[in-house]
Amino acid sequence: MDWLVQWWDGVELWVVQLPVAVQFPVVMIVVLPLCLGVARLIDRVADWGAKNPASGSEVEPEPEPEKVAA
């Protein structure tokens, strides 16, 4: 895991040393699609979790109260 931290530090140092006019396009081209992909992944996992609850027992719905005629 140490290699990943060292690699990230190198990338971060490289980006920080770039001029701002170059930093902006690099960040927009790399970070924006990456964030969009992670957001879509989280959305799909949340949808899957909502459709397939992990609990093994089925919860019975409460019966609806009887309607009173007015």
Image (cartoon, rainbow, N blue to C red):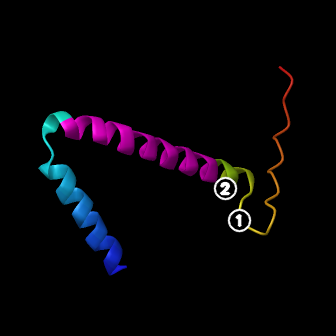
Residue under circle 1? 54
Q: Residues within 10 Å of mark 2 (few under 14, many from 20)?
A: few
Quadrant position of residue 5: bottom left
Which amino acid, by three-letter code, is at mark 1?
Ala
Residue under circle 2? 49
Which amino acid, by three-letter code, is at mark 2?
Gly
Tell which residue pokes out farthest to the bottom in this image.
2
Q: Position of residue 33 (x, y in %)?
A: 44, 41
Q: Position of residue 32 (x, y in %)?
A: 39, 40
Element class at badge 1:
loop
Magenta stretch in the rendered image: 22-46
Determine whether, in the image, residue 70 is placed left or right of residue 49: right
Front-lying residue, 63 or 68: 63
Q: Residues within 10 Å of mark 1 (few under 14, many from 20)?
A: few
N-term-proximal mark, 1 vs 2: 2
Q: Which mark is residue 3?
A: none
